[in-house]
Image (cartoon, rainbow, N blue to C red):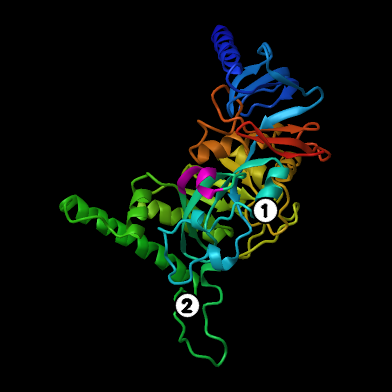
Amino acid sequence: MIRHLLTCSFSVALASLAAAQQDVTAYTNARVLAGGRPSMTNATIVVAGGKIVAIGTDVAVPEGAGVVDCTDKTITPGLIDASFVPGISDNDANEQSDEVTPHLRILDSLDPEDPTFRRARRDGVTTAHVMPGTQNVIGGLGCVIKTHGDDPDAMVVKQDASVRIVMGSEPSMRNRAPRGGRVESMYYRRPTTRMGVIWAVRRAFYDAQEAMQKTQGAPDQGAPAPGIEVLTRVLQGKLTAVTTARSEQDLRTALRIAGEFGYQTVIDEAQDAYMVADELAAQSAVVMLGAPSATSVSGGGSRDGAAPRSGTVRALADKGIKFVITTGTNTRRLPLIREAMFAARNGLGPQQALDAITIEPAKLLGVDDRIGSLAAGKDADFVIWSQDPLDPAAVAESVYIDGKSVSQIR
């Protein structure tokens, strides 16, 4: 408690000092769900220079600061969608010249004017983890970005946040010649079966292992090829591998491959996760749940023969499996907050549901030092809701990124 008071006193002093140099705003009388800790009532958040400088129930409003009265409102951290699908065409999200392209960056295809970012902001999403598409076996590097900005580089929170691996039918779809036709195109380059998809993953990691062994034996032989270098970082535990897998067989394969090569993988989509909960727990795998209400409730479609259930999210929680909630490749594109609401309705505690779209994805993506919760020193990314955000009638009245209003209902 004493440490808390000292921190608050220091922060308020800092805010008062900054008031003479820059705009300072205090958001008062709010119910605050700060992320990862109990809620606060009649709390105040002081923002200056794009950062939170003070937060608590005993924080004084700095002299000269602007005041926003948030009586009867709820403030949460800006939501984080850990598997966000922007409005990029398949032609720009999937490189067709090769089935394994770990060194390509989805950042190079992002358009700041993409209307999906605007819709995400409207729904309270201030940060998104964007990955390449799902038609390559290994699609490339994902990035973490803010959902508002004029320049993709300026929006970046973390450039190389992950490399995407895809199991299932998508990497082999449309790879067979039309009936009666011949395979003559350079685009006929992918495997045509699950066996071929898995072999392409194995071969890529075998090559990376071989390159690592050669480098250890002859460190002066030069840098490896860019794709090999990316996969080497995965094997060294320096880069997160995200494996998109939906059906039971693909989930088991994803875990088996990770165990075989000794890297830790995050499982994306995972609609059949309830069938392999013990295996996920044994490998301490983190799951990025696409449409965690099991798609049958939230309205998304199922692929690869997966049989989703509404109780999946609770089943993972009961096993102690770490997970986050995402919109993923849900074709209905329901707001992220709605996915958390469905999870809460299916047995997940309200705080855990909200944490699964705020602080937990921030930890997973390695950006929790800046975002994911409301605390002094962190980016001023937050949402003012009309009422409890998990209430079906809740509306994101104001959304702030780096202390600036980026979406507001008038």
In the image: residue 43, left or right of residue 233:
right
Is 60 in front, or is 351?
A: 60
Residue stretch in magenta: 151-161
Quick one: which residue is furthest to the front in this view?
A: 21
Image quadrant assignment for residue 38 = top right
Mark nearer the viewer, 1 or 2? 1
Side of 250 where 119 appears, left or right: right
Give the quarter of the figure containing the C terminus. Answer: top right
Amino acid type indicated by mark 1: Thr
Residue 159 in magenta stretch: yes
| Residue 285 in the image, given as x and y percentages of width and height | 49, 45
**Which of the numbered marks, if any, corresponds to residue 12?**
none
- Residue closest to the eye, 19 or 172: 19
- State the quadrant of the N terminus: top right
Residue 154: x %, y % from top left: 52, 43
Amino acid under disc 2:
Tyr
Q: Which residue is drawn at 55% across and 93% down?
A: 180
Task: Name the spot of residue 46 as percent of width and height, x first.
Answer: 64, 20
Chain-order first, disc 1 or disc 2: 1
Residue 410 seen in render: yes
Residue in front for this viewpoint, 88 or 281: 88
**Residue 163 % position (x, y):** 45, 53
Residue 313 against residue 305 in the figure, above or below: above
- Tell me the residue that label 2 is attached to: 187
> Dot 1 corresponds to which residue?
116
Crowd tier of the residue under label 1, counting other residues whose Cα lies within 10 Å: few below 14, some 14–19, many 20 or above: some
Q: Can residue 293 be seen in this view?
A: no
Picture layout, residue 79 above or below residue 291: above
Q: Residues within 10 Å of mark 2 (few under 14, many from 20)?
A: few
Q: How far apart are marks 1 and 2 (CA)?
A: 29 Å
Question: Which element is circle 2 on?
Answer: loop
The structure residue drawn at horizontal position 46% and vertical position 73%, both measured from the top left corner, is 190
